[in-house]
Amino acid sequence: MFLIVGLGNPEEEYSNTRHNMGFDTVNKLAEQYKIEINKHKFKGIYGSGIIEGEKVIILKPQTYMNLSGESIIEIINFYKIKLEELIIIYDDIDVEPGKIKIRKKGGAGSHNGMKSVIKNLKSEEFTRIRVGIGTPEYKNDMINYVIGKISSEEEKEKLGIGTDTAKEAIIEILKNGVDIAMNKFN
């Protein structure tokens, strides 16, 4: 069973922000495969179903980004999910908008949500898909950029391409494995 986690911030005020690329991606995946994300437990909301013959749980932690690992570790422990069956999707300032990067392991970089995940899992060995959001014009405006509303239709379209590509990458991982997905999408 795979656990697919989209990172983001809960509540309406954070929808349509760059920091919610993980939520946006898993919402698209759930919609395509008719999986309802409506169960409240494990400090998150989740749903389960089948994608390409694989049983999956899709989770959106509701702890706010910086505590995402608390939700993930609870569901992993409850369902006894192996780290090689974990896929985490999140925004990344070091990846160009509209692009993604898939990795099988690695550090958190400057992403506080991933710092929480790694701290709680006590491991960096799990698949992650980084959805590019680019960087702000002024580096000292980073927080406002990441949690700020997406301003233009052009940017919204580019970020939408990124979440669509991330959704396709998840499907590829489930069908053919992470190595083939990395070769195809990186």
Image (spheres, rainbow, N blue to C red):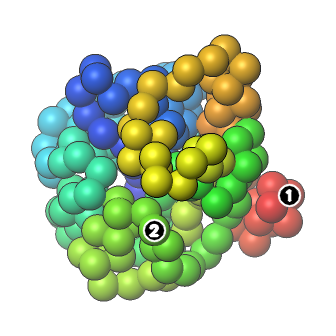
Locate residue 97, reporting x and y percent: 70, 42
With respect to residue 13, does 59 lie above or below?
A: below
Q: How many marks?
A: 2
Looking at the picture, how far across and down is residue 100, in whole percent? 70, 52
Q: Is 53 situated above or below 183? A: above
Residue located beneath label 1 in the image: 184
- The residue indicated by pointer 2 is 110
Q: Position of residue 180 (x, y in %)?
A: 80, 65
Q: Identify which amino acid the numbered label 1 is placed on.
A: Lys
SS category of the residue bearing label 1: helix
Q: Are marks 1 and 2 in contact (CB under 8 Å)?
A: no
Q: Quadrant of residue 8?
A: top left
- Up-down: is 125 above or below 16? below
In the image, taking residue 145 as reference, residue 135 lies left or right, namely: right
Res. 116 image quadrant: bottom left
Q: Is residue 110 left or right of residue 113?
A: right
Residue at x 73% of width, y 49% of height: 96
First in sequence, mark 1 or 2: give its number. Answer: 2
At x 23%, y 46%, the residue is 64
The mark found on residue 135 in the picture is none
Q: Quadrant of the N terminus?
A: bottom left
Residue farthest to the right?
184
Towards the viewer: 18 or 42 = 18
